[in-house]
Every structure is written in C-alpha cells, then in structure tokens.
Amino acid sequence: MINVTKTYLPDKEKYNFYVDKIFNSGWLTNNGQLVQLLEKKLSEYLGVKNLILVANGTLALQVSYKLLDLKEDIVTTPFSFVATTSSMVWEGLNPVFSDINPLTFNIDETILENTITEKTSAIVPVHVFGNICNFETIQRIANKFKLKIIYDAAHAFGVKYKDKGIANYGDVVTFSFHSTKIFHTIEGGAIIIKDAALYEKAKLMINFGIPGYDKISELGINCKMNEFQAAMGLCVLDDIEMIINNREKVYKRYLETIKKNEKIRFQKLNHEATQNFSYFPIVFESEEILLKVVANLKMKKVYPRRYFYPSLETLSYIKGKYSTPNSSDISKRILCLPLYESLKEDEQDGIIKILNQTL
Ligand SMILES: *Cc1c(COP(=O)(O)O)cnc(C)c1O
C-alpha cells in the first residue's frame, strides 16, 4: 500500500537515548529539558526568535487568535486544510473567504481588499503546499486597514524567502508538526510571535495562564508539548536535510516525467522562495478525469489525497454565502501524489504509468 505520505521514523536507538533521559529525570511534561532544547534548535533552524512549542498546529492557531485578541471577521482562504477555518469557528470567530489565485493556489492578494470591512480584525493566509504568499502586498493591505496577519505555515517548514526564514513575516506564524508533515513531533506545532511582550504572554497562555506557584495571571489553556514529542522532534530534526533532499529527488522525478503530459497542470511557484518539496499537487482538466485516476490507482493500492477538497466555504457550519469560484474549481480537480523520502523509483514509475494510461 502506498499512501500520499509516510511518517518518517528516525533511528530507534537515538529515540531510546532520549527516552532514557526522560525516565532518568522523571520529567515528562511542563516545559521539560527536551522541549527547551528543541525550541532552541528549531529557532536556529528556522532563523527566528520567540518560538513556542505546542501540542498541535490547530491549537497553535487557536492560541494565536486569542493572543492577538481577534474579534468578529477574519479574512482567510477557502483552499486549505479544514483546521485553518474550523479553529476560527471553534473560537467564535467568523471566517470570511477571499478567493485564491488559480495558478498559485494561495489567497489572491489582488482581490483581498474586497472582503475587508470594519468588522475585519485579521488576515489568515496559508502558504499552500509550501508555496509562499505575496508577503509585501498582504502586509501593505494589513497596514492600510490596521489588521493583524497570522500565517498558517503548516506546509512551509524550513522555507526561506529572500534568504530569510518565512516565519519572520507576519505578526504570528504557526506550524504543524503532525506525523504527516515533513518535520514532525508525532503530534505538535509551534507559534512564532513577532512582539516580545506578546511572546511572554503566549508562554503563559499555553499553560493555563500560570506564571509561577501562587499566581494565575492570564486566561489560559493547556496545549503544552510533552517530552516524548520533543524527543521525536530532536531525532527528526537531525535528519531533516536528508529528508528534504530525498523528497526533492522524488519531486523532480515526478515533474520531469509528468510535465510532458499536456493534460496536467502544476502549481505556479513563488521563485523568490525556496522549496521544501512537501507535496506534489497536480491539476486535471476535470473532476471526472481525477476520479478515474483515483480509481485506477486504488486498484493498485495507491492512495493519493484530494488536498484540498471540499473548498471550505461549503462546510455545513459556515454561515455566510461566498462566491469563490477559483477555489471551488481547483479543489475539484486537484490531487496530491504520494511523496515521501523513502518512495522508491519503481513505485513512482508504477504511479506515473497508471496516470499516463488513464489520461
Ligand atoms: C496540518 C495542518 C493544520 C493542523 O495541524 P495539526 O497539527 O494537525 O493540528 C493546520 N493548517 C494546515 C494548512 C495544515 O496542513
């Protein structure tokens, strides 16, 4: 069976080394040594300050909304994983969808202003499949309307824009370190906060708002990362270069062979940013063709994923009526092919063969 991704498992001996440390210290959670070490190493790797590890990427978003005291409407993209939107609704906020650029699959910054009203408090764009949004234009719009920006960077781990880590752009940036992502901590996530005072506040918010032994200073929640998660992160981070290099090979092999097929279209990339090769999305001419490809791959036990389907404005719990034709159209025709560091050439050839035969 070949799935869209395969969780990277590091050297078991190395993981055991950290597990022994945890058992020896008896410290399992609450800002333990390994969490502190991983925060330090990740800050270096991502080239950022003010990074906080949390239990998952969805809570990272929820805490960010609370941290920035967002109210009412948030302008966001309908083309993302459901958590970008569901986290807002969960926090009593109202996602307002602005359509995507059909080539980049990111929120279309040229029409973003049309959805902003006096009720809007923030913009939450997503770097879809690791493809970086137009930072400059989005920042200009945020400045003009005095809005906060939270980038959901769940797909953009390790990506650089103009030689700077992408997590340096925006008021707050969130990552997911779920097992399906290129860097993972089993479950996990991170929040990167530009403002130093808000960073201090966020550290309290993720731990019930408790600063010390006999005080509760903030409204908080519990979304701490534990030591076993951090241990996994430390092991995976050691191998991240190999993981990304291998994925690059698989990615380029797909590209070289599939680009000859004129019936398939690819994501238009931001060339001022690096790539992390986290996904290989392709767009078909119709949903009908996509469904045929999916069915034929399934017969060979290959399971690509329809990232992202359905378009989020269609969710049952969304109140407003939105017309986001690009997202609606792309979401029906897009498929992410299996891509992971250990995908073998013959497995990949099998997938490409089925794809070409079906078309
Ligand atoms: C994975 C993902 C999330 C959610 O992260 P979890 O760690 O699974 O909670 C949020 N946004 C996007 C774009 C994602 O891909």
Image (cartoon, rainbow, N blue to C red):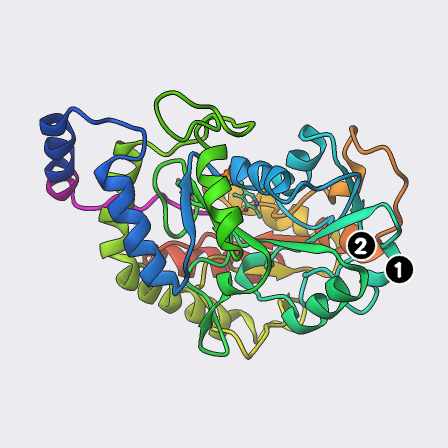
Residue 129 seen anywhere in this rendered image of the structure = yes
Q: Give the range drawn in magenta.
A: 1-15
Please report contact status of discs 2 and 1: CB closer than 8 Å, yes or no.
yes
- Label 2 residue SS: loop
The answer to whether residue 266 is above or below residue 178 is below
Q: In which quarter of the image is residue 136?
A: bottom right
The answer to whether residue 60 is above or below residue 250 is above
Residue 98 — which label?
A: 2
Looking at the image, residue 33 sits to the left or right of residue 44; the answer is left
Measure the alpha-carbon separation of dots 2 and 1. Answer: 8 Å
Q: How many labels does the image show?
A: 2
- In the picture, which quadrant includes the C terminus? bottom right
Q: In which quarter of the image is residue 272?
A: bottom right
Single out the mark in the foreground, 2 or 1. Answer: 1
- In the picture, which quadrant includes the N terminus? top left
Residue 114 — which label?
A: 1
Residue 120 within the segment the image draws in magenta:
no
Q: Residue 243: horizontal and vertical position, in percent?
A: 31, 59
Q: Residue 181: horizontal and vertical position, in percent?
A: 43, 48
Q: In which quarter of the image is residue 250?
A: bottom left
Q: Residue 354: horizontal and vertical position, in percent?
A: 52, 55
Q: Residue 75: horizontal and vertical position, in percent?
A: 77, 50
Of the pair 231 and 283, the residue shown nearer to us: 231
View extreme (top): residue: 214
Looking at the image, residue 7 sits to the left or right of residue 67; the answer is left
Q: Residue at x 69, y 40 (%)?
A: 85
Pointer 2 or 1: first along the chain = 2
Q: Which amino acid does label 1 sit on?
A: Asn
Name the chief secondary structure element in magenta: loop
Q: Residue at x 33, y 55 (%)?
A: 42
Q: Residue at x 74, y 45 (%)?
A: 311
